[in-house]
Amino acid sequence: METTKKEKQFDAVKMMRDIRDKITSDTQNMTFDELKAYIKQQLADSKTKLVGQQ
């Protein structure tokens, strides 16, 4: 049985690492209060609903 290797059109691990690196660079020198404000702003900008909230 011969296996063929398919080219990935979407690499979820690479995307996750890129996003994590961007967040790290954006927040590396923030205080705790600045970090909380950053997270709150990012959640407000995204239209994602938090778990348990409607």
Image: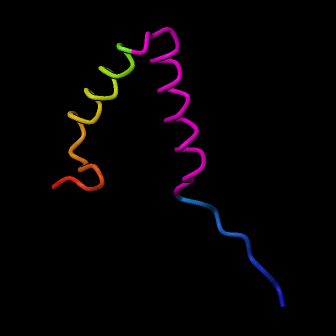
Quadrant of the image for the N terminus?
bottom right
Q: Quadrant of residue 26?
A: top left
Looking at the image, which residue sits at the far bottom? 1
Q: Position of residue 43 (x, y in %)?
A: 27, 36
Of 46 and 11, nearer the camera is: 46
Q: Residue at x 29, y 31 (%)?
A: 42
Q: Above or below — where is 22 with respect to 46?
A: above
Secondary structure that dominates the magenta span: helix
Q: Position of residue 50 (x, y in %)?
A: 27, 49
Which residues are the magenta region? 10-32
Of 25 and 54, nearer the camera is: 54
Of 52 and 28, nearer the camera is: 52
Q: Above or below — where is 44 with respect to 12?
A: above
Looking at the image, which residue sits at the far right? 1
Quadrant of the image for the C terminus?
bottom left
Q: Above or below — where is 4 with respect to 46?
A: below
Q: Above or below — where is 7 with respect to 43?
A: below
Q: Tell whether position 15 is magenta.
A: yes
Q: Tell whether position 18 is magenta.
A: yes
Looking at the image, which residue sits at the far left? 54
Q: Is residue 3 left or right of residue 23?
A: right
Q: Residue at x 52, y 56 (%)?
A: 10
Q: Residue at x 24, y 40 (%)?
A: 46
Q: Quadrant of residue 32?
A: top left
Q: Position of residue 30 (x, y in %)?
A: 44, 11
Q: Residue at x 23, y 50 (%)?
A: 49
